[in-house]
Image (cartoon, rainbow, N blue to C red):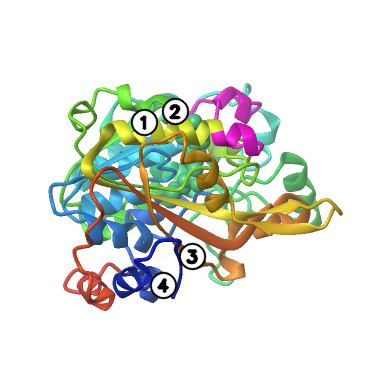
């Protein structure tokens, strides 16, 4: 365990925090979590730890940058009300599918209905960059049909779109001569650039297989429901974190959020538009859609990042209860010093130094979390582009009352609670 704090309560905090999430098995968590891979997602154990320490069943837990919905799902699984906000259409649909899911029966019935009324649509207008990924006889027409038919406003259809996004592309399993994914085999789970894919296909002599989408979707959906439904329903909004407090949610109106646990985008580390271009196409976006169009805040320099986080903290302060806690997971980044040498920069504390004048939230502590190198998604781009390091820090802030963890004397107790009786091992 490593803990960095500038307050005098070092010893008290180290008693209740033991970076507990590290002691959970790698694939721990509800079976909805792996619905679709997502860049820079955090392991479910991180939000769950803070949920266990700072909230009770029935409390409201918010993530204003919900990504694939990890934190709001953990809230709903543990009897809290999870709220997830994200500006990306992909993140939004994944979060919505997890916090307000339909029943398994209704999903399976809808797949049957769609299968029965299937009519092969024209694929003439499908962009070439999409055509190169899927077999044109069976798979692509079925995908296009579902893209046209599934409604973004219906719960059951949203769940299907989110599940389909999850199997849209990935690695073909040669050993088993089968794939749960619909595309030609792709080296990574995020969308590589079209040129890269074209080269990869040529070099590896890849062939497109005629895969039945309805069949693959049925298998996927059954797998997702392995752990049943989360015990409570939550909320998902496609909205900007800079002004989320005005959304019409009862907990925002009455400042009733007990915990905010989130990981904002940091500087230029991950481009959430470009690296999701295939899944965004499925959701009706044009494949030229860039981050500028999506208005995502993932390309800031330090100064504009400070203004952005300042705005977000203001919103957080408005919706938190007086005894509310706010945990921000922010990774260290690489920066060039004066001699053009790359150095690790503690972005979370650097930001807090600048932000403390702008917010009424108070500093409690910073918890250091080092990730194994191979787990850091951004490592794939190599030194020049991936500006993330393997160190994350959790900046813990509070509104009015000093936070009181529920399990101050034994972090270990949380692990045993999490491992039984509901062992969520996928
Ligand atoms: C680090 S990811 C969150 C990942 C999430 N913790 C998970 O486990 O999946 C940051 C998210 O911020 C979203 N985002 C970027 N700018 C935003 C904004 N202004 N408002 C809301 N969401 C935004 C991105 O779409 C991305 O999903």
Q: Are marks 3 and 4 in contact (CB under 8 Å)?
A: no
Query: Which residue does the numbered mark 4 point to in the structure image?
Result: 22
Residue 368 is tagged as 3
**Image: 66 above or below 127:** below
Query: Which residue does the numbered mark 1 point to in the structure image?
Result: 315
Residue 277 drawn at (x, y percent): 60, 36
Q: Is mark 1 within 8 Å of ligand 1?
A: no
Q: Earlier in the sequence, mark 1 or mark 3?
A: 1
Out of 183 and 259, give the one closest to the viewer: 259
- At 25% across and 22% down in the image, what residue appears? 248
- The residue segment tinted magenta is 283-306
Q: Is mark 4 within 8 Å of ligand 1?
A: no
Q: CA distance from mark 4 to mark 2?
A: 31 Å
Q: Earlier in the sequence, mark 3 or mark 4?
A: 4
**Dot 1 alpha-carbon crowd within 10 angstroms: few under 14, some 14 to 19, many 20 or more:** many
Residue 115 visible in rendering: no
Query: Which residue does the numbered mark 2 point to in the structure image?
Result: 242
**Image: 297 above or below 163:** above
Residue 1 drawn at (x, y percent): 44, 75
| Element on which disc 4 rests | helix
Q: Is mark 3 within 8 Å of ligand 1?
A: no
Residue 142 drawn at (x, y percent): 48, 35
Q: Is residue 43 left or right of residue 102?
A: right
């Amino acid at each position: 365990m490593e803990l960095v704090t500038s307050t005098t309560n070092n010893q008290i905090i180290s008693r209740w925090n033991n970076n507990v999430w590290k002691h959970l098995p790698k694939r721990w968590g509800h079976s909805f979590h792996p619905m679709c891979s997502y860049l820079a997602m955090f392991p479910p154990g991180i939000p769950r730890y803070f949920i266990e320490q700072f909230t009770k069943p029935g409390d409201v837990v918010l993530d204003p940058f919900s990504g694939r919905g990890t934190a709001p799902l953990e809230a709903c699984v543990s009897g809290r009300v999870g709220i997830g906000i994200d500006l990306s259409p992909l993140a939004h649909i994944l979060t919505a599918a997890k916090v307000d899911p339909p029943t398994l029966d209704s999903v399976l019935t809808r797949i049957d209905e769609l299968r029965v009324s299937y009519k092969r649509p024209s694929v003439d207008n499908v962009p070439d960059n999409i055509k190169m990924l899927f077999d044109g006889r069976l798979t692509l027409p079925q995908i296009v049909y579902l893209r046209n038919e599934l409604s973004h406003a219906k719960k059951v259809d949203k769940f299907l779109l989110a599940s389909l996004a999850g199997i849209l592309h990935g690695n073909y399993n040669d050993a088993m001569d089968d794939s749960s994914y619909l595309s030609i085999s792709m080296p990574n789970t995020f969308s590589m650039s079209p040129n890269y894919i074209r080269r990869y296909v040529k070099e590896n002599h890849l062939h497109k297989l005629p895969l039945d989408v309805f069949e693959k979707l049925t298998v996927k959906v059954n797998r997702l429901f392995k752990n049943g439904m989360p015990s409570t329903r939550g909320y998902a909004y496609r909205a900007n974190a800079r002004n989320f407090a005005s959304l019409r949610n009862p907990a925002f109106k009455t400042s009733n959020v007990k915990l905010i646990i989130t990981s904002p985008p940091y500087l230029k580390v991950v481009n959430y538009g470009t690296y999701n271009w295939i899944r965004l196409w499925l959701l009706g976006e044009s494949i030229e859609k860039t981050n500028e169009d999506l208005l995502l805040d993932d390309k800031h320099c330090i100064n504009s990042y400070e203004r952005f986080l300042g705005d977000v903290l203001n919103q957080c302060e408005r919706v938190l209860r007086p005894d509310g806690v706010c945990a921000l997971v922010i990774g260290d980044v690489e920066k060039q010093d004066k001699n053009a040498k790359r150095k690790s920069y503690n972005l979370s504390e650097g930001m807090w130094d600048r932000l403390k004048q702008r917010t009424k939230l108070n500093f409690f502590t910073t918890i250091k979390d080092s990730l194994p190198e191979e787990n850091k998604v951004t490592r794939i781009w190599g030194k020049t582009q991936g500006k993330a390091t393997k160190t994350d820090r959790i900046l813990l802030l509070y509104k009015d009352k000093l936070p009181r963890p529920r399990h101050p004397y034994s972090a270990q107790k949380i692990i045993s609670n999490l491992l039984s009786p509901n062992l969520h091992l996928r």
